[in-house]
Image: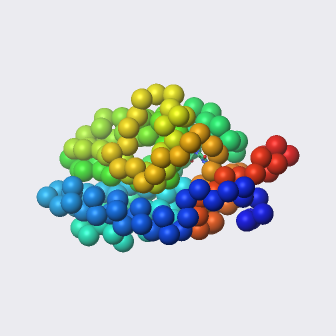
């Protein structure tokens, strides 16, 4: 896998520090809320959510949704499908959506609107990576680990054609991998 990576842009050490920082912020902001739901968007959220939740020092419920926006390519199709829905009611609940990356903003805009429509009391987003130059609609996550330029990255949950999710860092994929 490593031979396909042009450059590491977020190291394991940086990721750990970002998880600690975000976990502390969320702990502080949600200390008076009753059992917020940490809602991971599969599959990209897996490493980030499992690290981040260790640093949220509050009782939280953990739930998942599988929302598909990319179809094996390197740019957003804008076509969003809910493949697996959350398993509990969000009515009157405080939701923290946990995402690997925000690019066009379409996935999160759709999910936030859906959860609010279902009666969630509050919906905020924590993302490890933010690619603001990729936005097609205005969307600002409340908690951002690190802002990156408009490049296609893999690792730490992020995939190209379902591969590279298990890299422990975030890196830029060599162009020859997707121009084959
Ligand atoms: P958005 O709806 O365009 O904001 O897309 C967010 C989703 O697109 C993320 O959850 C990822 O699955 C995918 N995505 C966006 N940028 C990248 C990238 O650089 N590498 C891998 N997946 C990406």
Q: Residue 60 occupies which quadrant of the picture? A: bottom left
Name the spot of residue 152 as percent of width and height, x first. Answer: 64, 45
Query: Most extreme residue toward the top, as rendered?
Result: 137
Residue drawn at (65%, 37%), measured in percent from left and top? 75
Residue drawn at (50%, 69%), measured in percent from left and top? 13
Query: Most extreme residue toward the left, as rendered?
Result: 32
- Here the colouring is rainbow
> Could one spot residue 49 in this view of the protein?
yes
Name the spot of residue 46 as percent of width and height, x first. Answer: 50, 62
Name the one closer to the observer, 101 or 85.
101
In the drawing, does residue 53 fall left or right of residue 171?
Answer: left
Q: Which quadrant would the N terminus be assigned to in this image?
A: bottom right
Residue drawn at (59%, 56%), measured in percent from left and top? 9
Name the spot of residue 48 as percent of width and height, x first. Answer: 47, 62
Name the one closer to the observer, 14 or 106.
14
Name the spot of residue 158 as percent of width and height, x first. Answer: 59, 55
Name the one closer to the observer, 75 or 86.
75
> Could one spot residue 97 in this view of the protein?
no
Q: How many marks?
A: 0
Q: Quadrant of ligand 1?
A: top right
Residue drawn at (70%, 42%), measured in percent from left and top? 73
In the drawing, does residue 66 fall left or right of residue 97?
Answer: right
Query: Most extreme residue toward the right, as rendered?
Result: 180
In the drawing, does residue 147 fall left or right of residue 150?
Answer: left
């Amino acid at each position: 896998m490593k031979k396909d990576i042009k450059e590491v842009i977020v190291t394991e050490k940086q990721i750990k520090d970002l998880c600690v920082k975000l976990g502390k912020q969320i702990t502080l902001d949600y200390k008076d809320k009753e059992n917020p739901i940490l809602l991971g968007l599969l599959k990209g959220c897996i490493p980030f959510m499992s690290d981040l939740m260790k640093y949220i020092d509050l009782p939280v419920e953990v739930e998942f949704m599988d929302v598909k926006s990319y179809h094996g390519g390197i740019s957003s199709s804008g076509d969003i499908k809910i493949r697996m829905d959350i398993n509990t009611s969000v009515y009157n609940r405080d939701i923290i959506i946990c995402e690997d990356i925000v690019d066009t903003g379409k996935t999160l805009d759709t999910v936030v609107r859906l959860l609010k429509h279902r009666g969630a009391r509050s919906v905020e987003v924590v993302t490890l990576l933010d690619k603001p130059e990729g936005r097609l609609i205005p969307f600002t996550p409340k908690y951002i680990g690190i802002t990156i330029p408009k490049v296609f990255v893999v690792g730490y949950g992020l995939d190209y054609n379902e591969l590279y999710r298990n890299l422990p860092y975030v890196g830029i994929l060599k162009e020859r991998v997707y121009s084959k």
